[in-house]
Protein backbone atom coordinates (compact mmCIF):
# COMPACT_ATOMS: atom_id res chain seq x y z
CA UNK A 1 0.00 0.00 0.00
CA UNK A 2 1.30 3.42 -0.98
CA UNK A 3 0.07 6.79 0.31
CA UNK A 4 0.73 9.39 -2.36
CA UNK A 5 0.69 13.18 -2.61
CA UNK A 6 0.35 14.62 -6.08
CA UNK A 7 -0.06 17.91 -7.86
CA UNK A 8 -2.76 17.03 -10.36
CA UNK A 9 -2.11 19.98 -12.69
CA UNK A 10 -0.19 18.00 -15.31
CA UNK A 11 -2.25 14.80 -15.12
CA UNK A 12 -5.54 13.52 -16.48
CA UNK A 13 -6.46 12.15 -13.08
CA UNK A 14 -5.39 8.87 -11.48
CA UNK A 15 -6.82 6.27 -13.81
CA UNK A 16 -4.85 5.13 -16.87
CA UNK A 17 -6.43 6.00 -20.19
CA UNK A 18 -5.42 6.15 -23.83
CA UNK A 19 -3.78 9.31 -25.18
CA UNK A 20 -3.29 11.09 -21.85
CA UNK A 21 -0.77 10.82 -19.04
CA UNK A 22 -2.15 9.91 -15.63
CA UNK A 23 -0.80 9.54 -12.10
CA UNK A 24 -1.37 5.77 -12.32
CA UNK A 25 0.93 5.65 -15.36
CA UNK A 26 3.87 7.32 -13.64
CA UNK A 27 3.49 5.41 -10.35
CA UNK A 28 3.15 2.09 -12.19
CA UNK A 29 6.28 2.86 -14.22
CA UNK A 30 8.25 3.63 -11.04
CA UNK A 31 7.00 0.49 -9.25
CA UNK A 32 7.85 -1.71 -12.24
CA UNK A 33 11.28 -0.19 -12.60
CA UNK A 34 11.98 -0.73 -8.91
CA UNK A 35 10.64 -4.29 -8.65
CA UNK A 36 11.52 -5.50 -12.14
CA UNK A 37 7.99 -6.89 -12.25
CA UNK A 38 4.89 -5.91 -14.14
CA UNK A 39 2.59 -4.80 -11.34
CA UNK A 40 -1.03 -3.79 -11.61
CA UNK A 41 -1.99 -0.88 -9.32
CA UNK A 42 -5.43 -0.37 -7.75
CA UNK A 43 -6.34 3.15 -6.67
CA UNK A 44 -8.66 4.41 -3.95
CA UNK A 45 -10.59 6.63 -6.37
CA UNK A 46 -10.49 7.79 -9.98
CA UNK A 47 -10.01 11.56 -9.49
CA UNK A 48 -10.60 14.00 -12.37
CA UNK A 49 -7.94 15.83 -14.37
CA UNK A 50 -6.42 18.65 -12.32
CA UNK A 51 -7.53 17.31 -8.92
CA UNK A 52 -4.78 17.12 -6.28
CA UNK A 53 -4.11 14.64 -3.50
CA UNK A 54 -2.42 14.80 -0.14
CA UNK A 55 -3.16 11.18 0.74
CA UNK A 56 -4.22 9.14 -2.27
CA UNK A 57 -3.91 5.40 -1.61
CA UNK A 58 -3.03 2.62 -4.03
CA UNK A 59 -1.93 -0.99 -3.70
CA UNK A 60 -0.27 -3.72 -5.73
CA UNK A 61 1.09 -7.26 -5.32
CA UNK A 62 4.79 -7.88 -5.54
CA UNK A 63 7.25 -10.65 -4.71
CA UNK A 64 10.00 -8.07 -4.18
CA UNK A 65 12.16 -8.49 -1.08
CA UNK A 66 12.50 -4.74 -0.55
CA UNK A 67 11.41 -3.96 3.06
CA UNK A 68 7.90 -2.47 3.21
CA UNK A 69 8.93 0.99 4.43
CA UNK A 70 11.81 1.31 1.93
CA UNK A 71 9.50 1.41 -1.08
CA UNK A 72 8.60 5.03 -0.30
CA UNK A 73 12.22 6.24 -0.36
CA UNK A 74 13.14 4.25 -3.45
CA UNK A 75 10.05 5.24 -5.43
CA UNK A 76 10.59 8.94 -4.68
CA UNK A 77 13.93 8.76 -6.50
CA UNK A 78 12.15 7.36 -9.57
CA UNK A 79 9.02 9.53 -9.61
CA UNK A 80 8.57 12.97 -11.19
CA UNK A 81 8.63 15.84 -8.67
CA UNK A 82 4.86 16.37 -8.82
CA UNK A 83 4.17 12.89 -7.40
CA UNK A 84 5.58 11.89 -3.99
CA UNK A 85 5.12 8.75 -1.90
CA UNK A 86 4.49 9.60 1.77
CA UNK A 87 4.25 6.07 3.14
CA UNK A 88 4.64 2.47 2.02
CA UNK A 89 3.62 -0.61 3.96
CA UNK A 90 2.65 -4.23 3.59
CA UNK A 91 -1.06 -5.03 3.83
CA UNK A 92 -3.01 -8.27 3.73
CA UNK A 93 -3.68 -9.84 0.30
CA UNK A 94 -7.38 -9.06 0.78
CA UNK A 95 -6.72 -5.33 1.02
CA UNK A 96 -8.06 -3.20 -1.85
CA UNK A 97 -7.46 0.53 -1.68
CA UNK A 98 -10.90 1.25 -3.11
CA UNK A 99 -13.15 -1.49 -1.77
CA UNK A 100 -11.60 -1.65 1.70
CA UNK A 101 -12.03 2.11 2.22
CA UNK A 102 -14.39 3.02 5.07
CA UNK A 103 -14.36 6.73 4.36
CA UNK A 104 -12.58 9.71 2.86
CA UNK A 105 -11.88 13.36 3.53
CA UNK A 106 -11.77 15.86 0.68
CA UNK A 107 -10.82 19.55 0.77
CA UNK A 108 -12.03 22.28 -1.55
CA UNK A 109 -9.95 25.47 -1.58
CA UNK A 110 -11.41 28.82 -2.68
CA UNK A 111 -9.44 32.03 -3.21
CA UNK A 112 -11.97 34.81 -2.62
CA UNK A 113 -10.57 38.09 -3.89
CA UNK A 114 -11.05 40.81 -6.49
CA UNK A 115 -7.64 39.85 -7.82
CA UNK A 116 -6.27 36.53 -9.02
CA UNK A 117 -3.45 34.83 -7.10
CA UNK A 118 -0.31 33.89 -9.02
CA UNK A 119 0.76 31.34 -6.42
CA UNK A 120 -2.66 29.67 -6.04
CA UNK A 121 -3.59 29.67 -9.73
CA UNK A 122 -3.63 25.86 -9.98
CA UNK A 123 -4.35 25.23 -6.30
CA UNK A 124 -7.56 27.11 -5.50
CA UNK A 125 -10.71 28.21 -7.31
CA UNK A 126 -10.64 31.96 -7.73
CA UNK A 127 -14.00 33.52 -6.81
CA UNK A 128 -14.13 37.28 -7.53
CA UNK A 129 -17.31 38.26 -5.70
CA UNK A 130 -17.39 38.39 -1.90
CA UNK A 131 -18.72 35.27 -0.18
CA UNK A 132 -20.90 35.25 2.93
CA UNK A 133 -18.94 32.70 4.95
CA UNK A 134 -21.42 32.38 7.81
CA UNK A 135 -24.25 31.60 5.36
CA UNK A 136 -22.02 28.94 3.78
CA UNK A 137 -21.27 27.47 7.21
CA UNK A 138 -24.96 27.30 8.01
CA UNK A 139 -25.73 25.67 4.66
CA UNK A 140 -22.91 23.15 5.12
CA UNK A 141 -24.56 21.77 8.26
CA UNK A 142 -27.57 20.61 6.21
CA UNK A 143 -25.42 18.14 4.27
CA UNK A 144 -24.37 16.21 7.36
CA UNK A 145 -26.15 12.87 7.79
CA UNK A 146 -27.35 10.03 5.56
CA UNK A 147 -29.11 11.25 2.43
CA UNK A 148 -29.73 10.27 -1.15
CA UNK A 149 -27.28 12.64 -2.85
CA UNK A 150 -28.61 12.08 -6.36
CA UNK A 151 -28.99 15.87 -6.83
CA UNK A 152 -25.26 16.21 -6.12
CA UNK A 153 -24.03 13.64 -8.60
CA UNK A 154 -22.89 14.01 -12.19
CA UNK A 155 -24.19 11.52 -14.69
CA UNK A 156 -21.61 8.95 -15.65
CA UNK A 157 -21.18 7.33 -12.26
CA UNK A 158 -21.91 3.60 -12.21
CA UNK A 159 -23.15 3.03 -8.68
CA UNK A 160 -26.05 1.01 -7.32
CA UNK A 161 -27.23 3.57 -4.79
CA UNK A 162 -26.73 7.29 -4.38
CA UNK A 163 -27.26 7.16 -0.60
CA UNK A 164 -24.17 8.35 1.24
CA UNK A 165 -23.35 9.52 4.77
CA UNK A 166 -21.51 12.79 5.32
CA UNK A 167 -20.06 12.83 8.83
CA UNK A 168 -18.62 16.36 8.84
CA UNK A 169 -18.34 19.52 6.74
CA UNK A 170 -16.41 22.56 7.86
CA UNK A 171 -16.00 25.92 6.12
CA UNK A 172 -13.10 27.98 7.48
CA UNK A 173 -11.50 31.27 6.60
CA UNK A 174 -7.75 31.03 6.17
CA UNK A 175 -5.12 33.71 5.68
CA UNK A 176 -4.81 35.58 2.40
CA UNK A 177 -8.48 35.39 1.42
CA UNK A 178 -8.57 31.62 1.38
CA UNK A 179 -11.67 29.66 2.23
CA UNK A 180 -11.19 26.00 3.06
CA UNK A 181 -14.03 23.49 2.84
CA UNK A 182 -13.34 20.08 4.42
CA UNK A 183 -15.81 17.27 3.94
CA UNK A 184 -15.70 13.73 5.33
CA UNK A 185 -17.97 10.82 4.57
CA UNK A 186 -18.23 7.11 3.92
CA UNK A 187 -18.07 7.62 0.16
CA UNK A 188 -18.72 10.18 -2.54
CA UNK A 189 -20.58 10.06 -5.84
CA UNK A 190 -19.03 11.24 -9.10
CA UNK A 191 -18.33 15.01 -8.79
CA UNK A 192 -20.23 15.13 -5.48
CA UNK A 193 -17.69 17.26 -3.59
CA UNK A 194 -17.33 19.69 -6.50
CA UNK A 195 -21.13 20.07 -6.79
CA UNK A 196 -21.46 20.61 -3.03
CA UNK A 197 -18.68 23.23 -3.25
CA UNK A 198 -20.40 24.92 -6.20
CA UNK A 199 -23.71 24.94 -4.31
CA UNK A 200 -22.12 26.41 -1.18
CA UNK A 201 -20.56 29.13 -3.34
CA UNK A 202 -24.04 30.05 -4.61
CA UNK A 203 -25.15 30.28 -0.98
CA UNK A 204 -22.13 32.53 -0.40
CA UNK A 205 -23.31 34.80 -3.23
CA UNK A 206 -26.84 34.92 -1.78
CA UNK A 207 -28.31 33.18 -4.85
CA UNK A 208 -29.39 30.30 -2.59
CA UNK A 209 -30.33 30.42 1.10
CA UNK A 210 -28.81 28.03 3.67
CA UNK A 211 -32.26 26.58 4.31
CA UNK A 212 -32.72 25.76 0.62
CA UNK A 213 -30.29 22.86 0.98
CA UNK A 214 -32.69 20.23 2.47
CA UNK A 215 -35.15 20.88 -0.37
CA UNK A 216 -32.40 20.56 -3.00
CA UNK A 217 -31.23 17.28 -1.48
CA UNK A 218 -34.85 16.06 -1.30
CA UNK A 219 -35.54 16.95 -4.95
CA UNK A 220 -33.01 14.32 -6.19
CA UNK A 221 -32.70 16.70 -9.15
CA UNK A 222 -29.20 17.64 -10.32
CA UNK A 223 -30.56 20.85 -11.88
CA UNK A 224 -31.61 22.21 -8.48
CA UNK A 225 -28.06 22.12 -7.07
CA UNK A 226 -25.30 24.58 -7.92
CA UNK A 227 -22.67 24.36 -10.61
CA UNK A 228 -19.79 21.90 -10.45
CA UNK A 229 -16.84 23.85 -9.01
CA UNK A 230 -13.63 23.43 -11.03
CA UNK A 231 -11.28 20.50 -10.46
CA UNK A 232 -8.16 22.47 -9.51
CA UNK A 233 -9.61 23.51 -6.11
CA UNK A 234 -10.17 19.90 -5.02
CA UNK A 235 -7.84 17.77 -2.85
CA UNK A 236 -8.23 14.16 -1.73
CA UNK A 237 -6.90 14.58 1.81
CA UNK A 238 -7.19 11.12 3.38
CA UNK A 239 -8.68 7.68 2.89
CA UNK A 240 -9.74 5.75 6.00
CA UNK A 241 -9.55 1.94 6.38
CA UNK B 1 2.64 52.05 -8.19
CA UNK B 2 1.79 48.39 -8.62
CA UNK B 3 1.75 45.71 -5.92
CA UNK B 4 2.45 42.36 -7.53
CA UNK B 5 2.23 38.70 -6.55
CA UNK B 6 4.32 36.31 -8.60
CA UNK B 7 5.32 32.67 -8.73
CA UNK B 8 9.04 33.01 -9.42
CA UNK B 9 9.50 29.43 -10.67
CA UNK B 10 9.57 30.32 -14.37
CA UNK B 11 11.48 33.61 -14.06
CA UNK B 12 15.06 34.72 -13.66
CA UNK B 13 14.08 37.15 -10.95
CA UNK B 14 12.63 40.64 -11.33
CA UNK B 15 15.35 42.52 -13.13
CA UNK B 16 15.56 42.48 -16.93
CA UNK B 17 18.63 40.79 -18.36
CA UNK B 18 19.80 39.43 -21.68
CA UNK B 19 18.89 35.86 -22.65
CA UNK B 20 16.45 35.16 -19.81
CA UNK B 21 12.83 36.03 -19.12
CA UNK B 22 12.16 38.07 -16.00
CA UNK B 23 9.12 39.39 -14.16
CA UNK B 24 10.08 42.94 -15.15
CA UNK B 25 9.90 41.89 -18.82
CA UNK B 26 6.35 40.56 -18.62
CA UNK B 27 5.02 43.42 -16.45
CA UNK B 28 6.65 46.03 -18.72
CA UNK B 29 5.13 44.36 -21.79
CA UNK B 30 1.65 44.43 -20.18
CA UNK B 31 1.99 48.08 -19.08
CA UNK B 32 3.17 49.15 -22.53
CA UNK B 33 0.40 47.26 -24.25
CA UNK B 34 -2.18 48.86 -21.96
CA UNK B 35 -0.88 52.44 -22.12
CA UNK B 36 0.47 52.42 -25.68
CA UNK B 37 3.57 54.04 -24.20
CA UNK B 38 7.09 52.83 -23.64
CA UNK B 39 7.31 52.86 -19.86
CA UNK B 40 10.34 52.16 -17.74
CA UNK B 41 9.57 50.21 -14.56
CA UNK B 42 11.49 50.54 -11.28
CA UNK B 43 11.29 47.62 -8.84
CA UNK B 44 11.56 47.49 -5.06
CA UNK B 45 14.29 44.81 -5.18
CA UNK B 46 16.10 42.59 -7.65
CA UNK B 47 15.05 39.14 -6.39
CA UNK B 48 16.90 36.00 -7.53
CA UNK B 49 15.65 33.41 -9.99
CA UNK B 50 12.98 31.22 -8.39
CA UNK B 51 12.14 33.64 -5.56
CA UNK B 52 8.40 34.36 -5.12
CA UNK B 53 6.55 37.50 -4.12
CA UNK B 54 3.26 38.22 -2.41
CA UNK B 55 3.75 42.00 -2.42
CA UNK B 56 6.52 43.10 -4.79
CA UNK B 57 6.24 46.81 -5.60
CA UNK B 58 7.14 48.62 -8.82
CA UNK B 59 6.41 52.05 -10.27
CA UNK B 60 6.44 53.84 -13.61
CA UNK B 61 5.43 57.17 -15.14
CA UNK B 62 2.56 57.35 -17.57
CA UNK B 63 0.34 59.97 -19.14
CA UNK B 64 -2.47 57.44 -19.48
CA UNK B 65 -5.95 58.58 -18.42
CA UNK B 66 -6.89 55.15 -17.04
CA UNK B 67 -8.08 55.62 -13.41
CA UNK B 68 -5.42 54.60 -10.88
CA UNK B 69 -7.28 51.61 -9.45
CA UNK B 70 -8.30 50.25 -12.88
CA UNK B 71 -4.72 49.47 -13.90
CA UNK B 72 -4.76 46.36 -11.68
CA UNK B 73 -7.83 44.85 -13.37
CA UNK B 74 -6.68 45.71 -16.88
CA UNK B 75 -3.12 44.45 -16.37
CA UNK B 76 -4.34 41.13 -14.96
CA UNK B 77 -6.06 40.42 -18.27
CA UNK B 78 -2.74 40.97 -20.08
CA UNK B 79 -0.35 39.21 -17.70
CA UNK B 80 0.56 35.51 -17.62
CA UNK B 81 -1.18 33.56 -14.83
CA UNK B 82 1.95 33.38 -12.68
CA UNK B 83 2.08 37.18 -12.26
CA UNK B 84 -0.89 39.03 -10.73
CA UNK B 85 -1.38 42.70 -9.83
CA UNK B 86 -2.98 43.08 -6.39
CA UNK B 87 -3.19 46.85 -6.27
CA UNK B 88 -2.54 49.89 -8.47
CA UNK B 89 -2.47 53.49 -7.36
CA UNK B 90 -1.12 56.89 -8.19
CA UNK B 91 1.88 58.08 -6.20
CA UNK B 92 3.87 61.32 -6.18
CA UNK B 93 6.49 61.80 -8.95
CA UNK B 94 9.21 61.56 -6.26
CA UNK B 95 8.15 58.03 -5.30
CA UNK B 96 10.64 55.29 -6.11
CA UNK B 97 9.70 51.74 -5.17
CA UNK B 98 13.27 50.94 -4.12
CA UNK B 99 14.64 54.18 -2.68
CA UNK B 100 11.44 55.24 -0.92
CA UNK B 101 11.12 51.88 0.87
CA UNK B 102 11.38 52.13 4.66
CA UNK B 103 11.40 48.38 5.25
CA UNK B 104 10.47 44.94 4.01
CA UNK B 105 9.17 41.62 5.25
CA UNK B 106 10.43 38.37 3.77
CA UNK B 107 9.22 34.82 4.42
CA UNK B 108 11.25 31.64 4.14
CA UNK B 109 9.25 28.40 3.94
CA UNK B 110 10.73 25.03 4.94
CA UNK B 111 9.10 21.65 4.42
CA UNK B 112 10.58 19.44 7.13
CA UNK B 113 9.82 15.80 6.38
CA UNK B 114 11.43 12.48 5.49
CA UNK B 115 9.44 12.65 2.28
CA UNK B 116 9.30 15.30 -0.43
CA UNK B 117 6.07 17.23 -1.05
CA UNK B 118 4.64 17.22 -4.57
CA UNK B 119 2.55 20.33 -3.94
CA UNK B 120 5.32 22.35 -2.27
CA UNK B 121 8.14 21.32 -4.60
CA UNK B 122 8.68 24.86 -5.94
CA UNK B 123 7.26 26.64 -2.89
CA UNK B 124 9.30 25.42 0.08
CA UNK B 125 12.81 24.13 0.80
CA UNK B 126 12.61 20.44 1.57
CA UNK B 127 14.73 19.57 4.64
CA UNK B 128 14.87 15.81 5.30
CA UNK B 129 16.38 15.73 8.80
CA UNK B 130 14.30 16.78 11.82
CA UNK B 131 14.74 20.40 12.91
CA UNK B 132 14.80 21.57 16.53
CA UNK B 133 12.31 24.43 16.21
CA UNK B 134 12.79 25.85 19.70
CA UNK B 135 16.58 26.10 19.15
CA UNK B 136 15.88 27.92 15.88
CA UNK B 137 13.48 30.30 17.64
CA UNK B 138 16.10 31.06 20.27
CA UNK B 139 18.76 31.65 17.60
CA UNK B 140 16.43 33.91 15.61
CA UNK B 141 16.17 36.31 18.54
CA UNK B 142 19.90 37.09 18.28
CA UNK B 143 19.45 38.62 14.83
CA UNK B 144 17.06 41.31 16.04
CA UNK B 145 18.61 44.75 16.33
CA UNK B 146 21.11 46.86 14.41
CA UNK B 147 24.18 44.92 13.33
CA UNK B 148 26.81 44.81 10.63
CA UNK B 149 25.47 41.82 8.67
CA UNK B 150 28.59 41.40 6.53
CA UNK B 151 28.79 37.70 7.54
CA UNK B 152 25.28 37.25 6.12
CA UNK B 153 25.89 38.80 2.73
CA UNK B 154 26.93 37.24 -0.56
CA UNK B 155 29.64 38.96 -2.55
CA UNK B 156 28.27 40.85 -5.49
CA UNK B 157 26.20 43.37 -3.60
CA UNK B 158 27.13 46.99 -4.30
CA UNK B 159 26.26 48.73 -1.07
CA UNK B 160 28.08 51.34 0.98
CA UNK B 161 27.38 49.81 4.35
CA UNK B 162 26.39 46.36 5.54
CA UNK B 163 24.74 47.69 8.72
CA UNK B 164 21.03 46.83 8.78
CA UNK B 165 18.30 46.74 11.41
CA UNK B 166 16.16 43.64 11.82
CA UNK B 167 12.99 44.54 13.73
CA UNK B 168 11.48 41.07 14.01
CA UNK B 169 12.10 37.40 13.21
CA UNK B 170 9.60 34.67 13.93
CA UNK B 171 9.91 30.92 13.39
CA UNK B 172 6.55 29.11 13.44
CA UNK B 173 5.40 25.57 12.90
CA UNK B 174 2.58 25.31 10.40
CA UNK B 175 0.43 22.37 9.39
CA UNK B 176 1.82 19.55 7.27
CA UNK B 177 5.43 19.79 8.50
CA UNK B 178 5.87 23.36 7.35
CA UNK B 179 8.14 25.78 9.14
CA UNK B 180 7.64 29.45 8.38
CA UNK B 181 10.33 32.02 9.01
CA UNK B 182 9.22 35.66 8.82
CA UNK B 183 11.79 38.42 8.94
CA UNK B 184 11.27 42.19 8.88
CA UNK B 185 13.85 44.93 8.67
CA UNK B 186 14.80 48.26 7.18
CA UNK B 187 16.69 46.61 4.33
CA UNK B 188 18.49 43.43 3.39
CA UNK B 189 21.88 42.71 1.85
CA UNK B 190 22.29 40.44 -1.15
CA UNK B 191 21.18 36.89 -0.16
CA UNK B 192 20.89 37.98 3.50
CA UNK B 193 17.54 36.30 4.19
CA UNK B 194 18.63 33.08 2.49
CA UNK B 195 21.88 32.98 4.49
CA UNK B 196 20.01 33.66 7.75
CA UNK B 197 17.58 30.85 6.83
CA UNK B 198 20.49 28.52 6.04
CA UNK B 199 22.16 29.39 9.34
CA UNK B 200 18.95 28.81 11.32
CA UNK B 201 18.62 25.42 9.62
CA UNK B 202 22.12 24.49 10.86
CA UNK B 203 20.97 25.50 14.35
CA UNK B 204 17.94 23.26 13.80
CA UNK B 205 20.28 20.34 12.96
CA UNK B 206 22.37 21.02 16.09
CA UNK B 207 25.46 21.88 14.01
CA UNK B 208 25.36 25.38 15.48
CA UNK B 209 24.07 26.48 18.88
CA UNK B 210 21.62 29.39 19.29
CA UNK B 211 24.26 31.31 21.26
CA UNK B 212 26.78 30.99 18.41
CA UNK B 213 24.84 33.62 16.45
CA UNK B 214 26.25 36.77 18.12
CA UNK B 215 29.80 35.53 17.50
CA UNK B 216 29.03 34.75 13.84
CA UNK B 217 27.52 38.22 13.36
CA UNK B 218 30.53 39.78 15.10
CA UNK B 219 33.04 37.88 12.96
CA UNK B 220 31.91 39.74 9.81
CA UNK B 221 33.06 36.55 8.07
CA UNK B 222 30.73 34.96 5.52
CA UNK B 223 32.41 31.58 6.06
CA UNK B 224 31.25 31.44 9.69
CA UNK B 225 27.55 31.62 8.77
CA UNK B 226 25.50 28.76 7.33
CA UNK B 227 24.86 27.90 3.72
CA UNK B 228 22.64 30.00 1.48
CA UNK B 229 19.21 28.33 1.57
CA UNK B 230 17.74 27.79 -1.92
CA UNK B 231 15.76 30.51 -3.69
CA UNK B 232 12.48 28.65 -4.10
CA UNK B 233 11.66 28.83 -0.34
CA UNK B 234 11.88 32.65 -0.30
CA UNK B 235 8.96 35.09 -0.57
CA UNK B 236 9.01 38.89 -0.60
CA UNK B 237 5.91 39.47 1.52
CA UNK B 238 5.60 43.23 1.84
CA UNK B 239 7.43 46.50 1.23
CA UNK B 240 6.77 49.38 3.64
CA UNK B 241 6.78 53.08 2.67
Image (spheres, coloured by chain):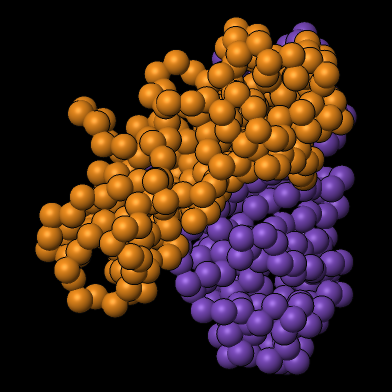
Chain colours: A orange, B purple
Q: Is residue A120 left or right of residue B183?
A: left
Q: Is residue A171 left or right of residue A116?
A: right
Q: Is residue A126 left or right of residue A82?
A: right
Residue at (75%, 62%) from the top-left corner?
Answer: B182
Q: Is residue B61 left or right of residue B110?
A: right
Query: Front-most of A15 and B32?
Result: A15
Query: Front-most of A188 and B63?
Result: A188
Across and down, in percent, residue B58 comes to 70, 36
Residue at (46%, 49%) from the top-left corner?
Answer: A101
Across and down, in percent, residue A152 comes to 58, 21
**Quarter of the rendering occupied by the N terminus of chain B:** top right
Q: Is residue A46 above or below residue A218?
A: below
Number of numbered callouts drawn: 0
Q: Is residue B114 above or below residue B20?
A: below
Regarding residue A14, the answer to whether it shows in the image is: yes
Locate residue B224: give its quadrant. Answer: bottom right
**Quarter of the rendering occupied by the C terminus of chain B:** top right
Across and down, in percent, residue B109 comes to 63, 61
Across and down, in percent, residue A126 comes to 65, 27
Residue at (43%, 65%) from the top-left corner?
Answer: A87
Query: Front-most of B231 and B102?
Result: B231
Residue at (60%, 24%) from the top-left corner?
Answer: A148
Locate residue A205: give its quadrant. Answer: top right
Regarding residue A181, the answer to whether it shows in the image is: no
Query: Front-most of B228 and B91?
Result: B228
Locate residue B136: give its quadrant. Answer: bottom right
Amino acid sequence: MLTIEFDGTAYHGWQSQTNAITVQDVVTAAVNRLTGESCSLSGSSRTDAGVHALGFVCNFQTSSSIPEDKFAYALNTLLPEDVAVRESREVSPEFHSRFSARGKTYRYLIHNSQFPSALLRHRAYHVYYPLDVSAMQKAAGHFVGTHDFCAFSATGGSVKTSVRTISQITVDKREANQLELNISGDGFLYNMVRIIAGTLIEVGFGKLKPDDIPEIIGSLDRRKAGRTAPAHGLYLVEVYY
